[in-house]
Image (cartoon, helix red, strand yellow):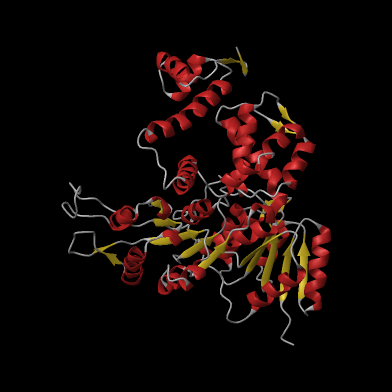
Amino acid sequence: MNDPHTILVADDDKAVRTVVDQALAREGHVVRSTGYAATLWGWIADGQGDLVITDVVMPDDNGLDMLPRIKRARPALPIIVMSAHSTLLTAVKATKRGAYEYLPKPFDLNELVSVVQRALSPVSSTPPVSSAAAFEIDDQLPFIGRSPVMQDIYRIIARLTSTDLTALIIGESGTGKEVVARALHMYSKRADQPFVAVNMAAIPRELVESDLFGHEKGAFTGANSRHGGRFEQADGGTLFLDEIGDMPLEAQTRLLRVLQQGEFTPVGGRKPKRADVRIIAATHRDLRQLVNQGLFREDLFYRINVVPIRLPPLRDRIEDVPALVQHFLAAVADEGLPNKTIDQLAMARLTSHTWPGNVRELENLVRRLAVLYSDDVIGVDTVEVELADPAASRKVADGEGLGATVERQLQQYFAAHKDSLPTSGLYGRVLREVERPLIALTLSATRGNQLKAARVLGLNRNTLRKKLRELDIPVVRGGVPW
């Protein structure tokens, strides 16, 4: 057995101190424990201890606030931070202030022992402390949730804040991939530089290279002036490539060259340009499968898959639903919408839902509850009504917007009538099919108030009245035809 090490433990919970003391003593360590930060600091200042384990919240001080002081006094002393108030902010602060590791409570004792062994090993190195001038942490939390799977995400993000490593965020639609990307940027040394997000699925294939790398005047028809692409816009900061699995192969080739050489050439240009850009990519697709199908370059996959971050679907962290609901209710109230609360039965129903649309679906539902219902306290019957439409949930889960829904319906129409298309008038028929329910539902939502409906639709009142006649829409008041 190696020579015993002295470990200093500070936690205001006696039960925690006892189990930690016993676990470390079984490993042959000498443990000194206290419930006060002042006592811990006295030991450290006297040169005692080979490792520190400290809670964040203590009666006389904050463990996170002590970290810089400890690192200044004894830079090589490894510190493990533990906290029951486990948020991304806590993890990031602990890492940035020099903690060797951050463990959310409740933690597994075997994991704690393993972390202690690594921290005490000769090859262990304590993370450097970022200077306060170079790094300021915003107290606005980008994540809600204290489930174990989210704690793992917090720790990964915290570890990445001091690096420029490329990250690949993988998760279903609605799990918050862009939120993670923004957090990686927000807590990095590039925080005061641009964060540029681009959705690869939303760019026409023929414009992808121009959008990413820019183009020179006259490079193609319609290029009437020089255009700086996303790489140029993100210089010094972070470029977030969302839905990278939808990037065309030819653009993948150019992106690989940029990642390898750190330079790019605008479309129609001859002189390469350099851009200091950190790449964060995201996808809801299986990139390995796309590689096997020849739809995604294998070498590019390995370039962007340096640090994979897998976001859990909401169904795998269902215990976070109440906190998310409260957060979204507070957010809509801050926007000026009615202040609502959810009763216990309604909350229980929300936590029993599978949430195919993940956090985005939950947020949309909370907003509907705040806007469409007059009750100050939302009950279970109201929640049941909103959760009763599986087709709507399916669309939200797929991230399907109105345009995609219309396109899908038109594809089905053309497939069914490919040999019997009308000779004329299809444009007007399609517009009528969309226009009629849009106007009727807007009138219903405004309880028959034509002036308000016209304002919502962006029409003048006379135009709305004309369309009501043309489309044979009954006028409603209070939701009832009259």
Could you tell me how many numbered marks the image carries?
0
* Relative side of 218 to 314, left or right: left
Q: Nearer the viewer, residue 286 or 24?
A: 286
The spot of residue 227 in percent (x, y) is 24, 50
Q: Position of residue 365 (x, y in %)?
A: 63, 38
Q: Relative to 350, say whether 292 is above or below.
A: below
Residue at 48 percent of width and 14 percent of height? 451
Quadrant of residue 76 within the rendered picture: bottom right
Is any part of residue 82 visible from this angle? yes
Residue at far front of view: 420
Seen from the viewer's position, the closer of residues 308 and 91 is: 308
In the image, 190: left or right of 395?
left
Of the pair 274 and 400, the residue shown nearer to us: 400
Q: Quadrant of the N terminus?
A: bottom right
Can you tell which quarter of the image residue 455 is in? top left
Q: Is residue 278 left or right of residue 305?
A: left
Residue 394 coordinates in the image, percent (x, y): 60, 47
Q: Outermost residue, bottom direction?
A: 1
At a point 73% along the width and 73% down the height, the residue shown is: 113
